[in-house]
Image (cartoon, grey):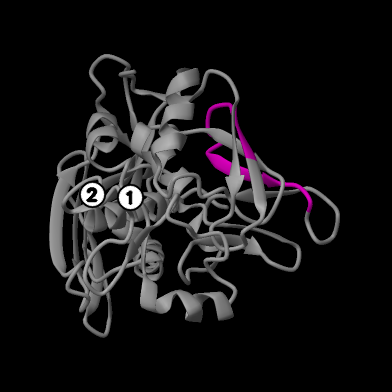
Amino acid sequence: MRTNNQTTLKAAATLSGVGVHSGNPAAITIRPAPANHGIAFLRTGTPLGNDRLIKAHHALVSATELCTVIGDVETGAVATIEHLMSALFGLGVDNALIEIDGPELPILDGSAKLFVEAIDAVGLASCGAPKRWLKVLRPVRIEVDRAFAELRPIDRGFRLDVEIDFDNPVIGRSRKAMDLSPATYRREVAEARTFGMMKDVERYWKAGFALGASLENTVAVGENGVVNPEGLRFPDEFVRHKILDAVGDLALAGLPIQGAYRSYCGGHRMNVGVLSALFSDRANYAIVEAAGTRQGTLVDLGASLGLAAFAADV
């Protein structure tokens, strides 16, 4: 679907499974939403017994250890949102309401493949309002020890350049760069599964993580190779999954990004951190929108309002 209008789903899509960390059953329904709604989660079954609407926004991230969590655990949070957010961002979905009946999304097969298939099955619809982007105007960079993540301006589109470097010889060092589009996302990113090292399993279990992990939803890495009998889906599946996660975390900008992302030894913490750095100064970014459905010319909304840049409030 090629359009310079905002998009949403044509109909609701429902998926269910188990949470990879909690091990508990989980079900979600992705519903259509109107223009300028953005992506939000309607959490039911909260600790206080009331439903809670949680905007998918970096400012509401409450944890980034092994997965991305938004909301407050005591009043209602949603964990492991990155794979669904990645599918929505990757396919160009601007507006959706995700109803979820518990604290964690289903892990499904460990990738975004089944989310993509569910969205493709119902199709996308135009919301009748111009599409908007978050345009990076100035480079921003964060560093933690040897790791770094940065966003830079580019003339058009969204480009990712992700490098991993593990001391495990099975994973090792790998780098992949790509321009993101729905076609490249489906072909090169969506099927890449989450992974973990067997030596860490007991430590994760003691910390309350990976209780639902299995060879059905995780690439298990041993000392001498991949444990899963089917092997890898791509020779470089590990770095492709890191791209998948980065796309999902960066979707928490609230709008699709026009810019270039580069990371080395990154992860959820770094992905969310570079968004915080971007939003720390309004001179770093602007919100632009498509001026027409045919030409797709971008109009700088900040400039039209006499501002250097502005951002939508949460």
In front here: 237 or 51? Answer: 237
The residue furthest right is 49
Q: Residue at (25%, 75%) from the top-left corner?
A: 223
The residue furthest bottom is 145
Q: Secondary structure at mark 1?
A: helix
Which class describes the residues within 10 Å of circle 2: few (<14), some (14-19), or many (20+)? Answer: many
Q: Residue at (13%, 59%) from the top-left corner?
A: 175
- Give the spatial CA distance, label 2 vs label 1: 17 Å
Seen in the picture, residue 143 relative to 121 is either above or below; the reply is: below
Q: Position of residue 167 (x, y in %)?
A: 20, 79
The residue furthest front is 229
Q: Position of residue 154 (x, y in %)?
A: 16, 47
* 53 sits left or right of 253 in the view: right
Q: Position of residue 182 (x, y in %)?
A: 29, 31
Q: Is residue 80 visible?
A: yes
Q: Does the magenta-highlighted stretch encompass residue 42? A: yes
* 132 sits left or right of 314 in the view: left
| Amino acid on which the number 1 mark rests in the picture | Leu
Q: Is residue 308 visible?
A: no
* 74 sits left or right of 134 in the view: right
Q: Position of residue 168 (x, y in %)?
A: 22, 75
Q: Which residues are magenta?
A: 28-45
Q: Nearer the viewer, mark 2 or mark 1?
A: 1
User: Can you tell which mark lies on residue 259?
Assistant: 2
| Amino acid on which the number 2 mark rests in the picture | Gly
**Which quadrant of the rendered structure holds the N terminus?**
top left
Report which residue position mark 1 lands on: 244
Q: Does the magenta-highlighted stretch encompass residue 223? A: no
Q: Secondary structure at mark 2?
A: strand
Snapshot quadrant of residue 249:
bottom left
Which class describes the residues within 10 Å of circle 1: few (<14), some (14-19), or many (20+)? Answer: many
Seen in the picture, residue 66 relative to 231 is either above or below; the reply is: below
